[in-house]
Amino acid sequence: MSNSFEKNWTNYNNGYPLFDNEVSRYISVAPSKNQYRLSRKPFYCFVHFGMNTATGREWGAGVETVSDFNIKKIKPEQWVNTVKAAGASGIILTCKHHDGFCLWPTEYSSFSVKYTDYKGDIVKEVSDACRNGGIDFGVYLSPWDMHEPTYGTPDYNDYFCNQLTELLTNYGEINEVWFDGAKGTGAREFEYDWDRYYKLIRTLQPDANIAVCGPDIRWVGNEAGKTRKSEFSVVPAYLRDTESVSKNSQHDEKDAAKLQRLKSTDDDLGSRAVLSKNAYLCWYPAEVDVSIRKGWFWSKNENKTVKSSRKLFNIYLNSVGNNCTLLLNVPPTSKGVIYSKDVRVLKGLGKKINEMTENPILVERLGQLTKNDGFIDFEFDSLKKLKYVIISEDIRLSQRVEAFDIYIKKLNGKYKKAASKTIIGSKKIIKLRSKKCIGARLVIRQSRGTPAISEIGFYE
Ligand code: FUL
């Protein structure tokens, strides 16, 4: 690595101040300990499984009975092995979806696995399998409940907290709690006591991140695996307002297609123009939740809709490789296993993720740059076919880089621009088409204060 200062980026910074009070305000916002840990394990899987798996529905209708749950056994070790083969580091299980059916023998309702022919506690089996397999376990507990009679009365807050307490005390360490904003249009009006839920989680599982209708992890805003060009983690604090998350969520079983589109109004959540208008800011990184299939629950009619490994890998590049975390849904069948086709493509995904970094050309840890670091040049020891550049900021010092370019150095010593991008954040993966080169150059065009690049890696 060497620096050449022909054109110092600090002179330009695209016309924006490199340092001023506003910049200090933005970069004073950094991840919590839990959010930082999450950024180091950015890929994990959703497991939608429950009453809908048995009835072949997406939402249920609120009229199901325990006898409709005719599933006899599950093989959670197979789920864990599959998730690991895909390269993911954890599972979030739908312990209760909107239909209200509980996968654990809750004391507070008779609408649970306890009153079916299933012998056992599904939450326990899955959390044990995760622990034995060395991966994280998280819970999804739907706030909206079509079945519970107290829903719509203040008693429901007690019911919900009682259930949370069971889940957060009886199943070991819980890595993430996922609160869905979805609610049917005809559902009873109800004000959830979010603050009470959060307090309970912080007390019982202080290391858990609370996602979506929660303060730690932001819903990316669609369920199609799409992300914004610039996915900022420092955003206005009002985005954590759970009611606005809920308004933008699914309101009908058939809504899924609508959520495939990103709303253009949501496009810019964290540029200087946006932040400057907001007195309160927060660290709120985006999570991309997307299903391997058309629906969230398994249905044999949707076996044809399983996404290819290639498609999943592209989603991975656009999420994990674009400063987001990826929550990929892999729904088991009514036989309690992940379907063979899904297993195949997940293995393919894991292979592609591994291959990406299998042949490193050069990996450097840069740390905090100084005002004098302009272009940073990297020399390779021979002619290489550059395929990936992976850059990470040290986000403990916030998200700083707003624009950068990658140049490649050709055999004749000339530089050619290979990529021009905006943000970096916790990880930016740049895919190139096996560019022949003997070196590369990183040019940071715009930053909030001096950038802190924890690592840059070049791979063949
Ligand atoms: C949505 C729900 O309505 C879907 O059924 C699914 O659970 C998805 C992850 O969130 O809002």
Image (cartoon, grey):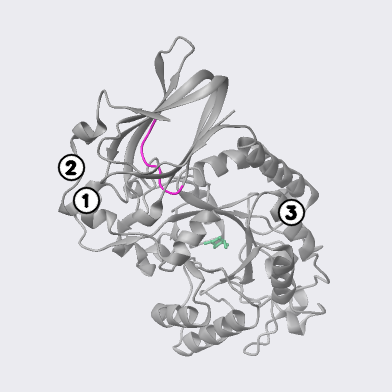
- Name the foreground residue: 389 vs 421: 389
Q: Which residues are magenta?
A: 420-426
Q: What residue type is disc 3 on?
A: Thr
Pointer 2: residues within 10 angstroms few (<14), some, or many (20+)?
some
Q: Nearer the viewer, mark 3 or mark 1?
A: 1
The residue carrying mark 2 is: 17
Q: CB at mark 3 closer than 8 A to ligand 1?
A: no
Residue at image location 66% in from the left, 49% down from the top: 87
Q: CA distance from mark 1 to mark 2?
A: 8 Å
Query: Residue 378 sits in which quadrant?
Result: top left
- Tell me if label 1 and label 2 are in contact, CB under 8 Å: yes
Q: Viewed as shown, does residue 40 lie left or right of 3?
A: right
Query: Residue 56 sits in which quadrant?
Result: bottom right
Q: What residue type is disc 2 on?
A: Pro
The residue carrying mark 1 is: 23
Q: Secondary structure at mark 2?
A: loop
